[in-house]
Image: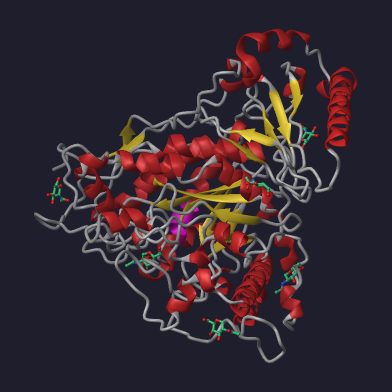
């Protein structure tokens, strides 16, 4: 691929001048009538007066006010609305508006923060919606260091995890311990619908109402994990292929409607980047490690390329400003140098597609590899818009039974936990904003420990003796709720730009939410998550932490403001392919690799029935027409070790396999 600038035409944001709308304001639902003892006749009269006032308001609105909003000639579009009904009309709704979902059920949109949704069937890429008054609408660029991320993950939706949807793992216990084994067990269970159960989960676990509730909760971003099998699977991989993509697009439509920005998170890559159950398969790390380390990395780069081509399209780039290219790669196993080589290669590949500088494709988020933020200072200086993503948890260390339902010695609820969160995460996050660049917390939770049903994996249990109290949220007393609430506020304030893990936890086989402190939705309902996330401001200072303020100014290259050039010294130190791969039996030159000679995959775009093709045609799934390399496939005539263990079954190679002609 050549390193060219953006080859796209700028997105036409002024659709209003091109297309005609019927502009219909979705009026708020009536408020509940006040409870007053009044005689029946008076009520009737008042009701009549009310109806009359409403009628007058409607008449005045549609004759006098509406034309100002419509701005352009609406007469031609009104005729089309008679044939296809109200489904083709632009509708906008704020607090109290009624939303009708695809299946016909209705809900009331509650948003006390000034947010409003926009439903524009004739321009499904309308970016005017705003989740609240303190977040810029999607049509206005995000300013890192000024605008603040208040986000949640949609964990467990497209990449399954035992503790998020425990009912599946209960049902197929003990065989199902990760999505691989779950998929095998499901596929075998045709009586229950086989793998179709997963599609049913995609369709029902997160609905439009969830997305509306997220916007109504003062939040403004979603982090959405997806797996490589959203794009394709290869023979032998049991995952449900290409299905979650459709449902991902559906969620994107809702995110746009409610004005939520999206961080796309590639959470599971071929071979497993961390060996954890949420990488698809509980296994050794075979991404950039082991004999299949190069091959799996090449395939991963290909999927990153295909996703980049999709999210960089003008229709999507303002909706998806961040792309987390590999979740939680296990640096301790892979090694810092070869991981850096991979990130540099991914950066160069991505920018060759998107072009350099602000507005050209997404920010590239990389995970800290479970290493201190300080160790990432000065990483690839001069690179173009790389974000450092850290996942601050106290949950996965040694058992710590320090109490939560007590006050500390200054009378603050939460015992030592809130102060510990501020100290551990506050100063380091702010230092990283200057030393690395944009730094986000892509995951954190309300739990200080590893309690909870299947949190440690299907069938596993924590040894923390306090778990019965932490798990039984229905019996939390006020001290417990106050402690957790203070811990959450401290975590939010310390991390600055954050995404809670996760929005929703499904019930286990017994019908209970077994990891209550991992559900934002439950915490909102139960009171330990703030109704307004901005109330976290200043929490750490109030707890006595000496502030380490970040002034909000990034070096130009960190936010795409300056011409980016990575120093030659950096690229020389981190060649691609890397000089060594950990855990392999052969040198990198003899390792199995793939070839880019297959047909390339273009991710299917969404189909919109009411929109003219002039609006949707450019969003065909592929941004840069000059990116014409093929898709990654096996080299004909070569045999490969198992993708998830890398063991050479016949003989250890002594020469690189380049196909039948070379052997
Ligand atoms: C909005 O608030 C009303 C009244 O409290 C409630 O009935 C409704 O379920 C809420 N809507 C959502 C989407 O939560
Ligand atoms: C962006 O959206 C806002 C509504 O949130 C609208 O008022 C404004 O005109 C839009 N700007 C552009 C450039 O489309
Ligand atoms: C497949 O399902 C059958 C019952 O339909 C069951 O007896 C068998 O153990 C299952 N095999 C696996 C591998 O789950
Ligand atoms: C499974 O994933 C959970 C998080 O979902 C993690 O806590 C646990 O350590 C993982 N277990 C294994 C064995 O990977
Ligand atoms: C980090 O910097 C921001 C912006 O200056 C500030 O509001 C916040 O208090 C700082 N956090 C810490 C822990 O010092
Ligand atoms: C509240 O609950 C916690 C956890 O069960 C317990 O340790 C604590 O003693 C309780 N506090 C009060 C005041 O009852």
Q: Overall secondary structure of the magenta stretch? A: helix
**What is the count of numbered marks?**
0
- Residue 341 lies in the magenta-colored region: yes
Q: Nearer the viewer, residue 603 or 394?
A: 394
> In the image, is 599 to the left or to the right of 530?
left
> Does residue 402 appear in the picture of this structure?
yes
Give the residues in magenta: 340-345
The percent coordinates of residue 367 (x first, y second) are 50, 61
- The picture places residue 111, in percent across and down from the top left corner, at 72, 47
> Is residue 230 visible in the rendered structure shown here?
no
Query: Which residue is located at x 44 percent, y 55 percent?
Result: 506
Task: Please provide percent x and percent y for residue 276.
Answer: 35, 63
How is the protein colored in the picture?
secondary structure
Vertical relation: 541 (above or below) 563: below
- 635 left or right, relative to 10: left
Farthest bottom residue? 409
Establish if 383 lies above or below 357.
Answer: below
How far from the left and from the top, in percent, is residue 596? 34, 37
User: Left or right of 6: which side holds 649?
Assistant: left
User: Against 21, is 199 above or below?
Assistant: below
Which of the 4 image quarters holds residue 351? top right
The C terminus lies in which quarter of the figure?
top left
**Outermost residue, left direction?**
650
Q: Nearer the viewer, residue 646 or 244?
A: 244
Q: Quadrant of ligand 4?
A: bottom left
Residue 577 sits in quarter: bottom left
For residue 167: magenta? no
- Front-most of residues 387 and 1: 387
């Amino acid at each position: 691929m050549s390193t060219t600038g953006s080859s796209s035409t700028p997105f036409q944001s002024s659709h209003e001048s091109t297309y005609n709308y019927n502009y219909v304001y979705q009026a708020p639902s009536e408020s509940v009538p006040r409870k007053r003892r009044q005689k029946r006749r008076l009520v009737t009269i008042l009701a009549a007066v009310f109806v009359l006032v409403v009628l007058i308001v409607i008449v005045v609105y549609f004759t006098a006010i509406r034309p100002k909003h419509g701005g352009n000639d609406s007469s031609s579009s009104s005729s089309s609305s008679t044939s296809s009904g109200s489904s083709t009309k632009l509708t906008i709704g704020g607090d109290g508006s009624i939303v009708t979902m695809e299946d016909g059920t209705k809900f009331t949109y509650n948003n006390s923060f000034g947010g409003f949704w926009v439903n524009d069937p004739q321009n499904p890429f309308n970016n005017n919606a705003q989740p609240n008054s303190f977040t810029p609408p999607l049509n206005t660029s995000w300013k890192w260091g000024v605008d603040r991320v208040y986000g949640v993950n949609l964990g467990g939706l497209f990449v399954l995890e035992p503790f998020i949807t425990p009912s599946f793992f209960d049902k197929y216990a003990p065989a199902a311990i990760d999505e691989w084994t779950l998929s095998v067990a499901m596929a075998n269970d045709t009586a229950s619908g086989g793998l179709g159960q997963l599609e049913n989960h995609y369709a029902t676990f997160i609905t439009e109402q969830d997305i509306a509730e997220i916007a109504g909760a003062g939040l403004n971003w979603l982090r959405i994990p997806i797996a490589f099998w959203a794009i394709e699977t290869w023979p032998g991989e049991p995952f449900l292929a290409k299905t979650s993509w459709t449902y991902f697009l559906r969620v994107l439509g809702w995110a746009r409607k409610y004005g939520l920005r999206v961080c796309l998170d590639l959470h599971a890559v071929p071979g497993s980047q961390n060996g954890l159950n949420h990488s698809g398969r509980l296994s050794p790390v075979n991404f950039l490690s082991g004999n299949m380390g190069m091959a799996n990395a090449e395939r991963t780069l290909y999927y990153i390329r295909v996703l980049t081509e999709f999210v960089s399209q003008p229709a999507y780039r303002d909706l998806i400003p961040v792309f987390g290219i590999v979740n939680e790669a296990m640096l301790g196993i892979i090694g810092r140098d070869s991981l850096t080589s991979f990130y540099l290669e991914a950066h160069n590949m991505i920018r060759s597609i998107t072009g350099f500088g602000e507005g050209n494709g997404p920010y590239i988020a990389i995970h800290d590899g479970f290493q201190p933020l300080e160790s990432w200072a000065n990483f690839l200086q001069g690179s173009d818009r790389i974000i450092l993503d850290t996942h601050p948890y106290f949950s996965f260390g040694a058992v710590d039974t320090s109490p939560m339902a007590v006050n500390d010695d200054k009378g603050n609820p939460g015992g030592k936990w809130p102060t510990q969160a501020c100290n551990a995460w506050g100063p380091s996050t702010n230092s990283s904003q200057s030393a690395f660049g944009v730094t986000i917390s892509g995951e954190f939770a309300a739990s200080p420990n590893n309690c909870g049903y299947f949190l440690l994996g299907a069938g596993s249990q924590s040894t923390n003796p306090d778990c019965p109290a932490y798990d039984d949220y229905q019996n939390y007393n006020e001290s417990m709720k106050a402690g957790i609430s203070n811990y959450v506020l401290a975590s939010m304030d310390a991390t600055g730009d954050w995404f809670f893990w996760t929005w929703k936890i499904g019930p286990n086989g017994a019908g209970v939410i077994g990891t209550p402190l991992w559900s934002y939705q439950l915490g909102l309902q139960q009171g330990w998550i703030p109704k307004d996330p901005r109330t976290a401001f200043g929490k750490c200072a109030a707890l006595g932490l000496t502030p380490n303020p970040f002034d909000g100014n990034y070096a130009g290259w960190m936010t795409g403001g300056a011409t980016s050039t990575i120093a030659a010294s950096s690229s020389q130190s981190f060649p691609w392919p890397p000089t060594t791969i950990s855990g392999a039996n052969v040198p990198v030159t003899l390792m199995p690799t793939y070839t880019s000679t297959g047909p390339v995959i273009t991710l299917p775009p969404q189909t919109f029935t009411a929109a003219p093709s002039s609006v949707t045609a450019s969003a065909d799934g592929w941004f840069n027409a000059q990116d014409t390399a093929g898709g990654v496939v096996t080299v004909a005539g070569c045999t490969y070790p198992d993708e998830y263990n890398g063991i050479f079954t016949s003989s250890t190679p002594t020469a690189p396999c380049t196909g039948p002609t070379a052997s």
